[in-house]
Image (cartoon, rainbow, N blue to C red):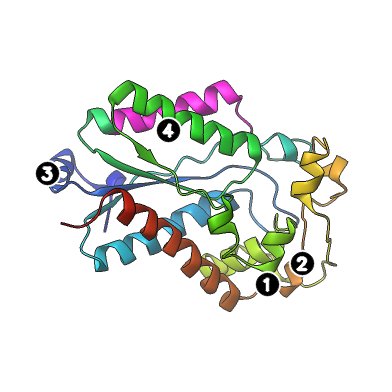
Amino acid sequence: MKRLGELTWRDADAVRAREPIVLLPVGSTEAHGPHLPLATDTILSEELSLRAAAALDADGYETLIAPALGYAITDYAAEFAGTISLSAETATAMVTDVCASLHAQRFARVCLVNSHLEPAHVASLKDACARAQARSGVAVLFPDQLEKRWARTLTDEYKRGACHAGSYETSLVLAARPELVRDEVRKTLAPHQIDLARAMREGKRTFLEAGASAAYFGDPAAASVEEGNDIYARLVAMIVETVRAAWPRG
């Protein structure tokens, strides 16, 4: 496991000759309740990339973690301070260009690792994968936890659609960067069991319209490191299975 951003160009040249799986973490900068950092999604994608890389390395693959992309479409949290959103055109173009540039650099096996689940963002990633493939002729993998085959393996809170900065995401941050969780705040937060996914389908356009005055859904106080590690294991399995199916070991 290596980080592309920490290599020299000569190091990178040596690594690409071994045809690594390049894991590209994708996140956002947006409000995640009063207890989690704005960079939550990026932190989760970086941690998931590290854990997936370790699993793939143990499986005999060479892995390389690319620098994370920390901006995305974040329209739903726009009313909260610190949220930075890209237009769909910019977001799609950014991911397309990064993937196509990796391909042009002869890093042919690129896999997105995404933790920001806003529908418009997920759609932009799918569009970017298609555009990058059209440009370079090489596929980009996108294991999407919103797909039913993966979503059904995740927690009850996730399945209820009330998981933005709730127990699900808070547990993941606790397991990765516990020092960034405002625990004294988290423990005072009452459960906010609103189905955000349904609210989105019903036409609600922001967290406030969906009823989240503090930018969280679910039950942050119920979060734990143990739950976080369990979720990471399920998400790692999603990435490993996707990589094995696309690029099986010889």
Q: Residues within 10 Å of mark 2 (few under 14, many from 20)?
A: many
Number of the front mark, 4 or 2: 4
Query: Mark 2 — residue?
Result: 219
Going 55% across and 50% down the picture, which residue do you hit? 115
Instruction: Say if residue 51 shows up in the picture.
Output: yes
Q: Residues within 10 Å of mark 4 (few under 14, many from 20)?
A: many
Type of the residue with mark 2:
Asp
Type of the residue with mark 4:
Cys
Going 69% across and 68% down the picture, which residue do you hit? 156
Type of the residue with mark 1:
Ala
Going 42% across and 24% down the picture, which residue do you hit? 131
Taking depth in this image into account, of 60 and 32 the one nearest to the observer is 60
Real-space CA distance between mark 1 and mark 4, rounded to the nearest whole angstrom: 33 Å
Real-space CA distance between mark 1 and mark 3, rounded to the nearest whole angstrom: 42 Å
Q: Are marks 2 and 1 in contact (CB under 8 Å)?
A: yes
Residue 233 located left or right of residue 8: right
